[in-house]
Image (cartoon, rainbow, N blue to C red):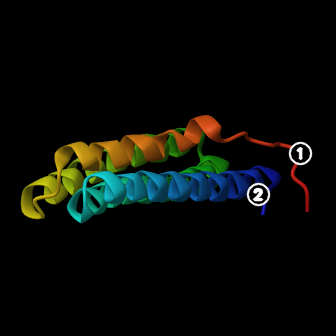
């Protein structure tokens, strides 16, 4: 495993952990103030963000492998991953709000709050073993 891959792996784990903590906090706040339906909705929205982060990490790993052979192909894999994340997010939000009848405000709040994890994450390139 390359150094960059190790840094990416540590960074993604940290982002996912921060996202989980934030989503649990938002869901707990909704549970305390607005009830179980709103808490479940926020949890669903946050789960979409977690899944999206995991998909991004997987795609970046695939892009690094592809770029080792052809840099244009690596860029294409990155763009395809961005499109996949966008479509996945839209489809899961539509499913949650439409079919599952979850609260749109709470779904979006859970999703947006989970995205804040990126601002709290510091990429440490001095990887410690």
Among the 4 quarters of the image, the one containing residue 101: bottom left
Task: Look at 31% across and 52% down and name the residue there.
Answer: 33
Query: How many callouts does the rendering have?
Result: 2
Badge 2 density bin: few <14, some 14–19, many ≥20, Cα 10 Å: few
Tag 2 secondary structure: helix
Query: Which of the two residues, 58 or 72, is positioned nearer the viewer here?
Result: 58
Tag 1 secondary structure: loop
Q: Earlier in the sequence, mark 2 or mark 1?
A: 2
Give the quadrant of the N terminus: bottom right
Residue 68 position in % (x across, y down): 67, 50
Give the quadrant of the C terminus: bottom right
Residue 91 position in % (x across, y down): 20, 53
On the image, numbered disc 1 is attached to which residue?
126
Question: Is 55 situated left or right of 30 in this image?
Answer: right
On the image, numbered disc 2 is attached to which residue?
6
Task: Look at 22% across and 42% down and name the residue there.
Answer: 105
Badge 1 density bin: few <14, some 14–19, many ≥20, Cα 10 Å: few
**Is 69 located above or below residue 112 in the figure?**
below
Among the 4 quarters of the image, the one containing residue 47: bottom left
Question: Is 19 situated left or right of 125 in this image?
Answer: left
Nearest to viewer (mark 2 / mark 1):
1
Task: Look at 47% across and 59% down and name the residue there.
Answer: 24
Query: Which of the two residues, 25 or 112, is positioned nearer the viewer here?
Result: 25
Query: Which of the two residues, 21 or 86, is positioned nearer the viewer here?
Result: 21
Question: Is 10 situated left or right of 72 in this image?
Answer: right
Query: Which of the two residues, 30 or 51, is positioned nearer the viewer here?
Result: 30
Residue 20 position in % (x across, y down): 52, 59
Residue 128 position in % (x across, y down): 91, 56
């Amino acid at each position: 495993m390359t150094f960059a891959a190790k840094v990416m792996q540590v960074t993604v784990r940290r982002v996912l952990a921060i996202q989980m903590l934030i989503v649990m906090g938002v869901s707990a706040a909704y549970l305390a103030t607005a009830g179980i339906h709103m808490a479940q909705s926020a949890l669903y929205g946050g789960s979409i963000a977690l899944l999206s982060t995991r998909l991004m990490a997987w795609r970046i790993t695939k892009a690094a492998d592809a770029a080792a052979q052809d840099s244009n192909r690596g860029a294409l894999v990155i763009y395809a991953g961005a499109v996949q994340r966008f479509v996945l997010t839209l489809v899961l939000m539509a499913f949650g709000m439409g079919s599952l009848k979850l609260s749109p405000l709470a779904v979006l709040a859970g999703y947006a709050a989970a995205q804040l994890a990126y601002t709290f994450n510091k990429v440490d390139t001095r990887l410690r073993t």
